[in-house]
Image (cartoon, rainbow, N blue to C red):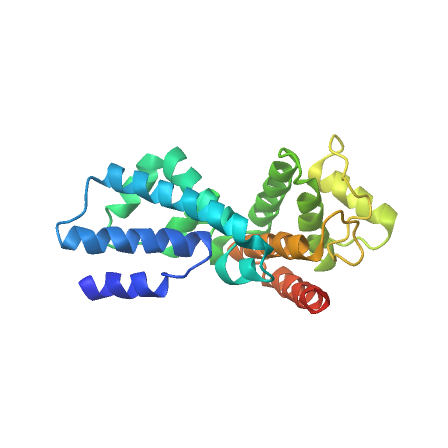
Amino acid sequence: MQNKYRKMYNENLLGTSDVSILKFYYASFKIQQAKNKVPEISAFLDDCAKISESTSLKLKISSFIPFFNLLFGTGREQKHIAEIIRTKREEVESLFMEDDISDDALKSILYGISPLMQANSLTREDTIQVVRDKILKCYSIKGKKQLGDRIFGYLLASELISAYTPEDRLLAWKAFVGEKIAPSDTKLHANPSLNRSNVDNKTLLKHLDTIREFYSEIKLEKVVSIIKKDMENLSAKA
């Protein structure tokens, strides 16, 4: 059992995804617990939240280094972990007290995707709803509207939603998101070379990596492959 947690600890030591970071904290807790050195679970999680916030700030400060975030994360992941630990404390505590955890259980806490909406059982309707909720969340946060536009743009790029002319794309947006929210860029392309952008290539790479991670979590691999190609093209120009 101890070897299992040590293996998990080592595999996720340098992890940059939300799931990997939380697995690292879980393994750390289990290793200390086995040695009777762990404090109360609540105090341990308080320390984890503080570490995540501190790491998030350091990664944000270091982001001027070319491709730094692609290797070590954007800092957004660590900030998200700190928020989850504080806002879903009871759920996280219960999870850490389990002898085994699954990626599905972690994703349920991290992204609000219930076990019924995981992997093989995720229906098209469920997937569409998760994407819609993500776009609406982006539009509720100042400075994140273009991120929402691109998330929708990749649905079009993958042809999961069919729309090819500018008029069709706008109609598809209204049918998907609703008529009350107008897109910040009516072109609604995902590709950075086509869509309007007020940010530099380094920031665009961060945006695309965030979108890639989101689509990867809900298993839309067709979209993920398109994003990866765009990131490779953008990196070559940086």
Question: Which residue does the image show at 76% across and 33% down from the upper left?
Answer: 179
- Residue in view at x 39 percent, y 50 percent: 106
Q: Residue furthest left?
A: 36
Going by the image, does 30 lie left or right of 111? left
Position of 236 with respect to 8 (left or right) is: right
Give above or below for 3 relative to 74: below
Q: Nearer the viewer, residue 165 or 9?
A: 9
Q: Position of residue 22 (x, y in %)?
A: 37, 51
Asked whether, in this view, residue 111 is left or right of residue 4, the answer is right
> Nearest the camera: 161 or 210?
210
Decide if residue 1 is in sight here: no
Query: What is the total number of numbered labels drawn onto the structure image?
Result: 0
| Residue 111 seen by the camera | yes
Residue at the spot 64% in from the left edge and 55% down from the top edge:
208
* Apparent side of residue 185 relative to residue 123 in the rendered image (left or right): right
Q: Where is residue 132? Give x, y as percent.
A: 63, 42
Q: Position of residue 235 (x, y in %)?
A: 67, 66
Question: Which corner quadrant holds the N terminus?
Answer: bottom left
Q: Position of residue 150 (x, y in %)?
A: 70, 50
Residue closer to the observer: 74 or 210: 74
